[in-house]
Amino acid sequence: MTKTQGIILSGIKYKESSKILKVYTRDLGKISVMAQGALKPKSQNLSSTEIFTISDFNLKKGRSFFYIESCDLVHSNYSIRQDMDKMIIGFYILELIDKSLPEEEENIIIYELLLKTLMILNTFNNPILISLGFGLKLATFLGYRPVLTGCAICDATSSPSWEFHPDKGGIVCDACSRGTGRKISQGEIGILNKLLLSTFEEIKTLNIQEETLGKLHGLISDYLLYNLDRREFKSLSLLKQIEHLNGLNS
Ligand SMILES: [Zn+2]
C-alpha cells in the first residue's frame, strides 16, 4: 500500500461505472490507476478523480494497474473546467507532462511545477502567460533549456536581427541563420529570458501584449514539440480549430 498525492492527467470510462486514470503522483511518478465504481453517482471518488484534480491517494499495486483503496480531494481546480480557454491550456499542460515523462519515475521538482501551475491557472485569468512560463520551466527541468543569451551556434551576443530555431536549441544570429527560422526581436528575447528567471508570482505581474504572447507561446510549443519528437499537440490543434470556428462566426 502506498500513500501519495496525485494530479489527474486523464481518465477514460471503463465498463459500466469505472475509470482508468493516468495520474501524476508525487512519489511514484506517472502511473495508471483503476478507479473502480468511480462513476457511480454516490461514489466517494467521483469528484476526486476528475481531470485537473489534486487528491491524496491510498493505492494498492496490482498487475497492470494501481487500485484506489481510498482517496481524499485536496483541490478540485474547478475553475479550469469552467472556462474554455483555461481548459484547453490546461489540457496542453497535462499533455506536455504526459508526453515528456516516462512511467513510474518520480520527479519532485516537476511535480511541484505542475501543482503550482494548475493552482495558478485556476485563479489567474491569463492562461497563455502561465502556459508560456510553464513550458520554459518544464524544458529547463527536462534538461533542454532554450539558449536565449547568445547565438546557439556561434555564441555571438549581438546581431542586427535574430531568428528562433528549435533544432539549433534557441536563438540564432544573423550570420549563422539562413532565413529558415522565425524572426524574433530583441524585446521578445528579453521577455523569454525574464519568464525563464521569474517566479510565477513575478510572472503574474508582467504586462505583455496579447499578440506577442501568442507568438512566443507558439515558438516555445514548437520548441517543445521538436524536443519531444512529436508533430503536434492534440490540445493546441483543438485550440486552433476553435479559433478558426470563432473566426468563421464573427
Ligand atoms: Zn551565430
Image (spheres, rainbow, N blue to C red):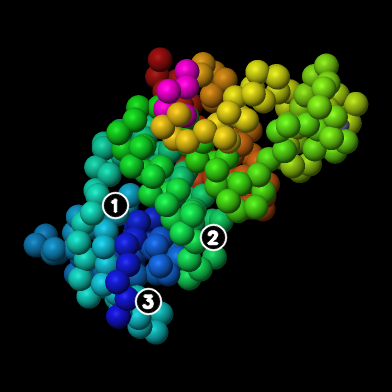
Q: Which mark is residue 65?
A: 3
Residue 236 drawn above or below residue 159: below
Residue 233 seen in the current view: yes
Image mark for residue 101: 2
Of tags 1 and 3, which is closer to the observer?
Answer: 1
Residue for point 40% across, 67% down: 27
Outermost residue, left side = 42
Return the residue at label 1. Answer: 53
- Marks 3, 2: nearer the viewer: 2
Q: Inspect the magenta stretch and tell me whether residue 205 lies in it.
A: yes
Query: In which quadrant of the rendered image does the C terminus lie?
Result: top left
Looking at the picture, which amino acid does disc 3 mark?
Phe
Under mark 2, the amino acid is Leu
Please tell me which residue is depicted at 67% across the width and 25% down the height of the picture: 189
Q: Which residues are magenta?
A: 203-207
Q: Quadrant of the rendered structure where residue 180 is?
A: top right
| Residue 46 at x, y percent in the picture | 18, 59
- Side of 179 relative to 18 (left or right): right
Task: Determine whether 189 is above or below 32 in the image.
Answer: above
